[in-house]
Amino acid sequence: ALGAGMDLPASQVIFESLAMGAEWLTIAEFEQMLGRAGRLGKHDRGKVYLVVEPDRKYHRGQDRAEDEVAMDLLKGVVEDVEPFADLETSAEQALATICATGVTSLEDVARVYRRHLSVSVPPSDALKHLVRRHMVRVRKGIHVTELGRATTLSFLTPTQGLEVLKLTSKMDVLDIAIKLEPFENVYLSSKLQGEIDSAFRTHMPTRFFSGVFMDISDLSGKRGGTSRLPSWVFDVFSKWTTHFFNCGCPLFPECDHPKIKLGRWLVEQRKAGLNPTGLAKKLHDEFHLWAYPGDIYSWLDTLIHNLKAVQRVAAVAGKVDLGVEIEGQIARIERPLDAQHGDNSGLEED
């Protein structure tokens, strides 16, 4: 991950692992990272080393071992990139450009749009989309609405901005922020995964929100795997049901409620003083789920940005009370008021 983000001259790049997070590197990611080795004017060549462990896998969901991945990456060819933007993305870009440049005439907006933005969607279609989402008004020129400005400042799409505005009247602000980007990088523990795979004699999904509950239900009648599961696994399933999968709504299990409930659980534990490492440990100890502390840290940071987005949109509707509530939520996430772990309460990783 460091190799993907830094922009410093380096004479060599060493890949200690070929995975980033829970997934193997793609060819594009690999090429981008190794391209850091050697910089014109500083080095005559760049060296790249791969420290590969044969047969290594980081979780059961990986179908290839690290040495196989290494060969695929070394032989791989980066695919050509073809710029394309759909209507929503084009409208989002157009709104940001209008806000940043201050252009108001239809002709100027169309000219800037064609010069800098997507050519796959006509500017007239993007503008119509913005009008329908109440982001701009077209009356003697193009004028950005308060909602449109709050939306683009918050890096929301036009559809998200309008949805957030509607949700502020019927949904808790924390739930709205979680719904914008739920925490999905959660996996079954290796012990639990092993028991499930063995009982059903097949490879089950490793991601928590991959529908593993439904898969187990479907296979239990066909293969009788449920009877081969030890009792502690049912205890884990019971905890999952009690904490996350108990909404009872007609859209279950396709609804957002389980993800929102997991997000709320993480936030409550965070408010109790746990840092990302502590959160990952408690998630594993209580629910036999695991997540990278770095992923949890990134998600909490994103959650704070999303809360600020909800705050901006709520202000458009004059909901000052929600703004005050959001300030309190952010303060308790960034620096828990009832921290129980001293220096570990800050939003940082060990």
Image (cartoon, helix red, strand yellow):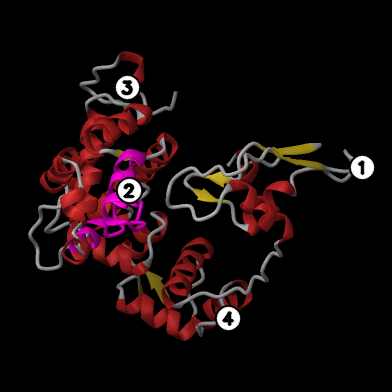
Disc 3: which residue: 345
Q: Quadrant of the N terminus?
A: top right
Mark before the other along the chain sequence, 2 or 3: 2
Q: Is residue 170 above or below residue 41?
A: below
Question: x, y percentage for residue 272?
Answer: 22, 26
Q: Give residue 44's mark.
A: 1
Of the two numbered discs 4 and 2 on the same chain, state the one appearing first in sequence. 4
**Which amino acid lies under the numbered mark 2 shown in the image of this protein?**
Phe
Callout 3 secondary element = helix
Tag 1 secondary structure: loop
State the extent of the magenta-drawn residues as a range: 188-217
Label 4 sits on residue: 119
Q: Amino acid at mark 1?
A: Asp
Against 33, is 28 above or below? below
Whether 230 is drawn above or below 157: the answer is: above
Q: Few, some or many C-alpha atoms within 10 Å of disc 3 (few <14, some 14-19, many ≥20)?
A: many
The amino acid type of the residue labelled 4 equals Val
Residue appearing at x 54%, y 81% in the figure: 110
